[in-house]
Image: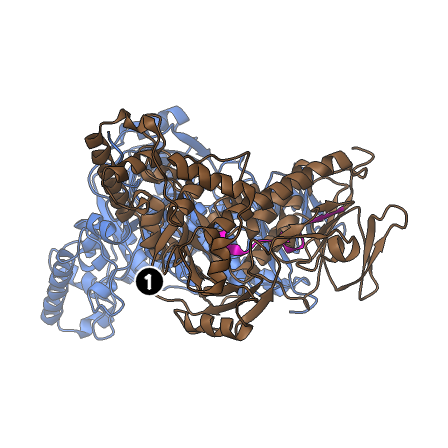
């Protein structure tokens, strides 16, 4: 600690992003001199609608020392092994984007190259037959692999579905236990330093003034500090990702919770399906240019499996990113930093990633621009990588049943994506670059699922004996099947280790 | 804003009493812009807090302060308590429990204990303990929150309190108080400035020379009563004739596997020994009469009766049972030990601070310090001390023990008038009346009188509204329901874990 150390961190807004940040700070800034305060208003609703996540959240939980079973039980959570995409490559088609890897590399040659070569020789099953997570998901099975589990079970990788409001509540308890101070109130004024615009304090409706050295803007789309005060600017990506509306609606449950998220393409948008322990989260994402809100709502209502548990909630958004995620002494996180539709369940990951990077580049009161610039560069890369990957789903399709799909299929995609598609199309090459979130498995699954077949495979694959490779592939496929068969169903696993607490059983009574 | 409003309160001393007062006052009045609270304490002066047991009223105090129970339990290493177990009080080898909560259930408009007395007359000798969920669950170390939504369950009205580390409690309250604007000043007081004319305290002067001025002073300086006694010479009402214990020897020891959700009091040859199990250790102490036992003997007896290895040397404390003649004199209100002392046999120390604060809030003065209002404060405070004293004396007086001069003295002493009346009323036909607003309820008096071996001569005639066989059948049913309910409650360790209330030692800094 020295005179430059940050003493007061103020988080504005207490949705999922705010409480994730608060929880992480309560652990990593617990240094005896930095105090974290979070300001939230119960009047302002949060967006959290039932969230799907990706595997890095396991790391976040681990960093915070959160017991995974307790976390799942407290959030009505379930496990997720990947995403099933229905009607995306073409109507009637489905594919699975699994967590984890496809198969095993042989003699230094990527599994998917061997698969591509084999596909040229004979009719092959979908590549998902070589993913532990896919095969288990197809059977509705789940178990957390033991730390010492060998292959193929050790390849099973998972993430979570949960109720975002319960998640915020869970993190709030964690953060408050760690000393984070919560102040209830609506921010009505932001005081900025005259010379450089640094935020000095926020004032609440009751007159309370909260001063800080570093502000975290978790105020949602509007960006109370990052945009309304600092006028940072926003880069819109709607020409690539035209969806700008969503309607969310929870329904009752039927059967067992599937261990995967489902994204079903509709003629003018797509619908999510997120199974929790107690209900199903559903929602439709669409473009207001192509469909009215009422039409979208009727499409959603016509495609539900259970009974609605609430009124449909309408949300609107603009896809894009804040030009600087970190401006002056304000770091935006969550929706205030940008938005990309939840097709690949990345919303919570953006927050987590922002938190981890901020901790790694944590400033002092001098706010060295080197740290800020590096943070902004890394966040920009992350947003753009995810953007490109999402665009791939819309652009690589055979669908021509609506103006919406025609526009998506024929649009000019970012150059960065064109280069990747070209590399893939030629010889099935995937290179994970720098900080890129989606790796080899993701590209292979989605590119094949969206019907982009490489013309050829890497010559290196030809070094291996075709019959031996064919036999090895068949052995792997059998191993995945057998391993999945031995797993419990997700419902069994939850009941055993992380069922949400039911109401207490009735007690005996005096009866006369 | 009233022109005569008090703008500055000074709390002298920062033990449990001082920080309770600071937290409560700041919570209620801290937002008045012209109102300030300053607490002066010195880290050189230790506090007495040795591991405290409380009674259910503490829940009111906690909710006034908006304290999250699980957070508080974790922060103070607290355990839950459902009552107090008394061992060897009536005679050596005997035990009973004074539960929080109720016995059985009133039936046909007649109090339960009359049905129980009738059952005894009919030959059912089952002890009263079997009808109290607090007792059965407490002895088995179980705990669960009350379930008011299920009125026919014995869990609907169970009462509970806590046992905690008093110094952690003070620290916890300090956090709350400082959040609400209380200013803490470190320093030893070397001088008290009194107005030459009125005798009101105007300021205290610290060793550093700093002068802390105030309009209302709350004396939480402990036994010595820095303001109320040393300065204002208020005088003390000495009750040692009724409560001859004047020493305590305290020591903490390692936790044992025996984890009842009860505080335990075990009678000894010249007094009694407390046992207060916390999450991380157990507090113990021997309260004794110096006229009957030397300090060394007390320490030896204490150390010989621990159920874990001692964690320090026993620490001696001295006191005199009784109370300050007036708890509020001029502009000084005495709270905690500065106001009086009653041995912790019924865990009342923190409660007395709490009610003192509540009364002060009700009668919060202006700079005029109205004598008429102050008189009420003092009258109610004295009444509360008297009520608790009588209940404590009952434990010493109603005993068969004749194994030492100490017990002979206690058994044969002349009880205070109010106590004598209560005992006699119960001896006739088992009648118990709670007088005015006294702290201990009918259930408490019943528990202690029956526990201490006082026999009721009869039961309420209206209990005969139930035919004899029906009375016996219902008594058996009640016992069964109580036992079943206890079995459905988790043991304390499980409860703490499930509610995330267990404190755990970690490498993290204390927040």
Q: Is residue A309 above or below residue A347?
A: above
Q: Classify residue A254 by image quadrant.
A: top left
For the magenta stretch, what is the residue range? B332-346
Q: Identify the residue under disc 1.
A: A430
Q: Residue B174: x and y, percent?
A: 62, 55
Output the letter for the chain in blue.
A
Q: Nearer the viewer, residue A127 or B363?
A: B363
Q: Secondary structure at mark 1?
A: loop
Colour in which the image shows chain B: brown
Mark 1: give few (<14), some (14-19) or many (20+) Cα within 10 Å: some
Q: Residue at x 33, y 26 (%)?
A: B462
Q: Residue B112: x and y, percent?
A: 34, 34
Q: Nearer the viewer, residue B111 or A396?
A: B111
Q: Residue A69: x and y, percent?
A: 32, 55
Q: Is residue A406 visible?
A: no
A232 relative to B292 in the view: left or right? right
B331 relative to A335 in the view: left or right? right
Q: Is residue B307 magenta?
A: no
Q: Quadrant of the C terminus of chain A?
A: top left
Q: Quadrant of the N terminus of chain A?
A: bottom right
Q: Nearer the viewer, residue A456 or A26?
A: A26
Q: Is residue A346 above or below residue B150?
A: below
Q: Residue A199: x and y, percent?
A: 68, 50
Q: Is residue B343 magenta?
A: yes
A211 relative to A461 in the view: left or right? right
């Amino acid at each position: 600690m020295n005179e430059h150390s940050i003493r007061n961190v103020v988080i504005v807004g207490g949705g999922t992003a705010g409480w994730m940040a608060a929880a992480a700070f309560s652990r990593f800034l617990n240094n005896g001199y930095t105090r974290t305060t979070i300001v939230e208003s119960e009047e302002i609703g949060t967006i959290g609608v039932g969230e799907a996540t990706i595997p890095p959240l396991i790391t976040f939980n681990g960093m915070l020392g959160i017991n995974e079973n307790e976390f799942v039980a407290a959030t009505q959570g379930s496990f997720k092994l990947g995403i099933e995409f229905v009607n995306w490559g073409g109507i009637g088609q489905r594919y699975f984007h699994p967590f984890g890897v496809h198969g095993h590399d042989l003699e230094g040659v990527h599994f998917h190259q061997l698969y591509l070569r084999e596909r040229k020789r004979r009719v092959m099953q979908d590549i998902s037959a070589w993913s532990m997570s896919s095969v288990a998901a197809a059977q509705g099975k789940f178990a957390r692999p033991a730390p010492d589990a060998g292959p193929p079970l050790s390849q099973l990788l998972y993430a979570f579905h949960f109720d975002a409001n319960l998640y915020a509540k869970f993190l709030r308890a964690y953060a408050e236990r760690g000393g984070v101070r919560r102040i209830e109130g609506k921010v009505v004024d932001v005081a900025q330093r005259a010379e450089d615009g640094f935020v000095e304090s926020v004032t609440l409706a009751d007159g309370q003034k909260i001063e800080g050295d570093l502000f975290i803007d978790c105020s949602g789309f509007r960006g109370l500090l990052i945009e309304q005060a600092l006028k940072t600017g926003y880069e819109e990506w709607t020409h690539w990702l035209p969806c700008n509306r969503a309607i969310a609606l929870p329904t009752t449950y039927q059967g067992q919770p599937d261990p995967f998220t489902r994204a079903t393409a509709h003629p003018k948008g797509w619908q999510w399906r997120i199974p929790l322990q107690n209900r199903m989260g559903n929602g439709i994402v669409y473009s207001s240019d192509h469909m009215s809100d009422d039409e979208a709502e009727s499409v959603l209502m016509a495609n539900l499996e259970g009974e609605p548990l609430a009124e449909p909630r309408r949300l609107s958004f603009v896809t894009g990113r804040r030009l600087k995620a970190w401006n002056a002494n304000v770091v935006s996180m969550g929706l205030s930093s940008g938005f990309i539709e939840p097709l690949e369940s990345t919303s919570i990951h953006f927050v987590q990633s922002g938190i981890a990077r901020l901790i790694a580049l944590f400033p002092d009161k001098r706010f060295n621009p080197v740290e800020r610039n590096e943070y902004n560069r890394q966040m920009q890369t992350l947003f753009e990588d995810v953007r490109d990957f999402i665009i791939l789903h819309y652009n690589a399709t055979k669908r021509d049943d609506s103006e919406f799909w025609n526009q998506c299929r024929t649009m000019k995609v970012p150059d960065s994506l064109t280069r990747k598609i070209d590399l893939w199309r030629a010889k099935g090459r995937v290179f994970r670059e720098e900080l890129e979130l989606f790796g080899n498995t993701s590209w292979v699954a989605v590119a094949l699922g969206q019907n982009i077949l490489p013309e050829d495979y890497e010559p290196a694959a030809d070094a291996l004996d075709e019959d031996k490779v064919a036999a090895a592939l068949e052995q792997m496929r059998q191993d995945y099947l057998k391993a999945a068969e031995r797993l419990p169903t997700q419902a069994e696993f939850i009941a055993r280790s992380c069922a949400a607490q039911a109401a207490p059983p009735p007690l005996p009574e005096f009866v006369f | 804003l009233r022109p005569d409003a008090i703008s500055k309160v000074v709390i002298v001393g920062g033990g449990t009493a001082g920080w309770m007062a600071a937290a409560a006052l700041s919570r209620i009045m801290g937002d008045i812009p012209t109102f300030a609270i300053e607490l002066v304490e010195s880290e050189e002066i230790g506090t007495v807090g040795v591991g405290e047991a409380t009674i259910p009223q503490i829940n009111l105090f906690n909710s006034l302060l908006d304290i999250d129970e699980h957070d508080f339990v974790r922060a103070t290493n607290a355990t839950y308590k459902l009552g107090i177990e008394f061992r060897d009080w009536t005679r050596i080898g005997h035990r009973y429990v004074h539960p929080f909560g109720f016995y059985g259930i009133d039936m046909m408009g007649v109090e339960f204990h009359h049905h129980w007395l009738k059952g005894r007359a009919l030959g059912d000798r089952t002890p009263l303990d079997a009808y109290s969920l607090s007792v059965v669950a407490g002895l088995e170390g179980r705990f669960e929150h009350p379930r008011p939504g299920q009125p026919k369950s014995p869990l609907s009205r169970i009462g509970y309190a806590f046992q905690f580390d008093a110094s952690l409690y003070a620290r916890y309250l300090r956090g709350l108080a400082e959040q609400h604007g209380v200013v803490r000043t470190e320093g030893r007081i070397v001088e008290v400035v009194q107005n030459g004319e009125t005798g009101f305290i105007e300021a205290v002067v610290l060793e550093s020379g700093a002068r802390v001025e105030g309009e209302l002073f709350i004396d939480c300086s402990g036994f010595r009563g820095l303001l109320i006694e040393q300065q204002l010479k208020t005088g003390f009402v000495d009750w040692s004739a009724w409560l001859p214990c004047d020493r305590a020897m305290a020591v903490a020891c390692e936790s044992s596997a025996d984890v009842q959700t009860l505080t335990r009091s075990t009678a000894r040859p010249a007094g009694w020994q407390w046992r207060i199990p916390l999450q991380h250790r157990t507090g113990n102490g021997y309260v004794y009469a110096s006229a009957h036992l030397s300090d060394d003997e007390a320490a030896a007896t204490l150390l010989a009766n621990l159920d874990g290895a001692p964690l320090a040397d026993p620490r001696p404390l001295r006191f005199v049972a009784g109370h300050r003649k007036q708890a509020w004199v001029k502009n000084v209100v005495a709270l905690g030990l500065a106001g009086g002392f009653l041995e912790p046999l019924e865990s009342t120390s923190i409660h007395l601070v709490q009610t003192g604060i509540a009364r002060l809030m009700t009668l919060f003065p202006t700079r005029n310090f109205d004598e008429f209002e102050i008189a009420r404060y003092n009258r109610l405070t004295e009444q509360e001390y008297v009520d608790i004293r009588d209940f404590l004396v009952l434990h010493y007086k109603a005993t068969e023990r004749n194994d030492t001069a100490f017990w002979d003295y206690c058994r044969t002493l002349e009880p205070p008038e109010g106590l004598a009346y209560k005992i006699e009323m119960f001896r006739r036909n088992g009648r118990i009346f709670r007088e005015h607003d006294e702290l201990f309820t009918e259930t408490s008096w019943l528990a202690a009188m029956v526990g201490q071996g006082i026999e009721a001569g009869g039961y309420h005639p209206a209990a005969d509204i139930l035919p004899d066989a029906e009375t016996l059948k219902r008594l058996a049913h009640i016992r069964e329901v109580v036992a079943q309910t206890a079995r459905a409650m988790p043991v304390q360790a499980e409860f703490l874990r499930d509610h995330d209330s267990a404190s755990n030692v970690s490498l993290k800094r204390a927040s």
